[in-house]
Image: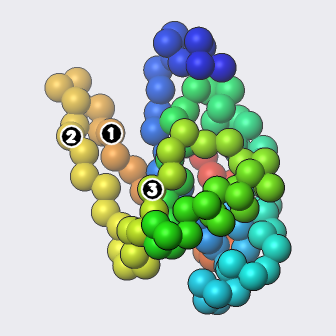
Amino acid sequence: MIENKLFCKIKTIFCDIDGTLIKHHGSLSKQLTHKPEILEGVIEKFDEWDRKCYNIILTTGRKESLRRITENQLAELGLVYDQLIMGIGGGPRILINDIKPSGLKTAFSVNLERNKGIRDVQL
């Protein structure tokens, strides 16, 4: 798929993990001790985004010291992504980007209900 990215107009998706991709259990300790449960539509969306050459960047409030555990959980679920950004905290997240000279807006936000999955997300 890497070769195809050279010929695609690539979108970048920043996607939270807990409560968005895998079921949120209410606390970090529970997230780490429960077997991760993938939410509805996640595998299908990731496959679709990969076919469309999108860059998938996962974000999480989990601390950097939990990187290995987090990467193992994601691998166990079969999730393929481009980057993992850790330690961003649990507060509001704001994306700031420029508008192209053509007027094309380049920043968007999708807010989802916790643990409902990403099946219906349209980009």
Q: Secondary structure at mark 2?
A: loop
Residue located at (31% from left, 63% from top): 94
Upstream in sequence: badge 2 or badge 1? 2
Which residue position holds label 3?
A: 85
Residue located at (68% from left, 26% from top): 51
**Are the two marked residues, 2 and 1, in contact with CB atoms closer than 8 angstroms?**
yes
Q: Position of residue 41 (x, y in %)?
A: 77, 54
Residue extending furthest toward the left: 101
The image's mark for residue 106 is 1
Q: Position of residue 16 (x, y in %)?
A: 54, 62
The image's mark for residue 90 is none
Quarter location, residue 70: bottom right
Q: CA distance from mark 1 to mark 3?
A: 20 Å
How many marks do you count on the picture?
3
Q: Is residue 121 left or right of residue 57?
A: right
Which residue position holds label 2?
A: 98
Which quarter of the rendered picture does the C terminus lie within?
Answer: top right
Q: Position of residue 114 (x, y in %)?
A: 63, 76
